[in-house]
């Protein structure tokens, strides 16, 4: 059985969903203690205090995108195509979510926590909104999923990220909301939401 160190509804949830998709049991290990601080257990296994950490046979693997690719390849999941252009596109969009969209949210949160001005927060939120507009444009051309007709791991991570902001902070296009609705309806996503106690609102 795998262990997954996680924060409720965070990027770790995408790895949780992938584990469900490939039919693997997982022991969820909360990364925060009762006071809401990062737990001593998490800091012991990852001194940077970041999730997700995936543990297999006592060996920790860091970085969510790496974990997703590893699991999809190990269990031969179509969520990451095996070869060719389809694989390249799926990895491109997974990396967009992991390395562009996710950090955009992080920048806004860091500003808010450290006394950034309203103008600074607004400017960085505008950058994030541009990314969501880019997603919508792609879906109109390629949809219903990021890579076309077939769902990939990128759609799962995108949908997890789409839940993070308070309602009304970002505007999601109709195609984006349709994608969210399709992805959250998947049994693996529903199972992860129930286990983590997450109520998804971004598709509304």
Image (cartoon, rainbow, N blue to C red):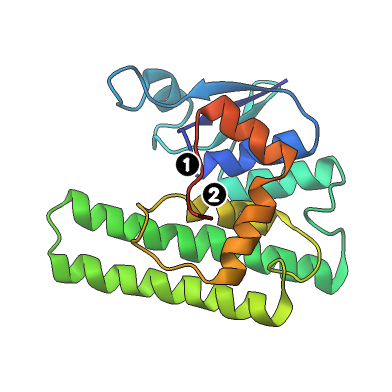
**Which residue is labeled 2 in the image?**
160
Residue 198, x across and y down, in percent: 50, 35
Classify mark 1: helix, strand or loop. Answer: loop
Question: Observer-nearest residue: 185 or 120?
Answer: 185
Q: Residue at x 49, y 56 (%)?
A: 162
Answer with left or right where residue 71 lies relative to residue 63: right
For this rendering, which residue is in front, 80 or 132?
132
Q: Quadrant of residue 159?
A: bottom right
Number of the label disc, if any, that sits on residue 119: none
Report whether 59 appears left or right of 187: left
Within-10-Å neighbours for mark 1: few <14, some 14–19, many 20+: some
The residue shown at (60%, 56%) is 180
Residue 81: where, in percent of width, then height? Answer: 83, 59
- Is the Cβ of the residue at disc 1 closer than 8 Å to that at disc 2? yes
Spatial separation of the CA atoms under disc 1 and disc 2 = 7 Å
Residue at screen point 36% across, 55% down = 106
Quarter containing the N terminus: top right
For residue 20, side relative to residue 200 (left or right): right
Work out whether 189 lies above or below 164. above
Q: Which residue is mark 1?
A: 10
Using the image, determine if residue 81 lies above or below residue 164: below
Tell me if I can see residue 99 in this picture: yes
Neighbourhood count class around disc 2 (C-alpha, 10 Å): few under 14, some 14–19, many 20 upward: many
Q: Residue at x 50, y 53 (%)?
A: 161
């Amino acid at each position: 059985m795998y262990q997954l160190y996680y924060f409720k509804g965070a990027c770790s949830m995408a790895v949780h969903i992938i584990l469900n998709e490939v039919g693997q049991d997982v022991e969820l290990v909360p990364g925060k203690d009762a006071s809401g601080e990062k737990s001593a257990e998490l800091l012991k296994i990852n001194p940077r205090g970041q999730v997700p950490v995936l543990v297999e046979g006592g060996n920790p693997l860091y970085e969510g995108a790496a974990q997703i690719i590893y699991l999809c390849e190990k269990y031969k999941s179509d969520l990451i195509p095996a070869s060719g252009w389809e694989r390249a596109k799926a990895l491109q969009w997974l990396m967009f979510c992991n390395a562009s969209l996710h950090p955009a949210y992080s920048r806004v949160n860091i500003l808010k926590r450290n006394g950034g001005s309203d103008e600074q927060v607004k400017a960085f939120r505008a950058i994030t909104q541009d990314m969501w507009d880019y997603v919508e444009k792609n879906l109109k051309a390629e949809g219903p999923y990021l890579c076309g007709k077939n769902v990939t791991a990128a759609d799962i991570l995108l949908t997890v990220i789409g839940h993070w902001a308070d309602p009304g902070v970002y505007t999601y296009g109709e195609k984006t909301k349709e994608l969210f609705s399709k992805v959250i309806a998947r049994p693996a996503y529903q199972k992860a939401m129930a286990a983590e106690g997450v109520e998804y609102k971004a598709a509304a």
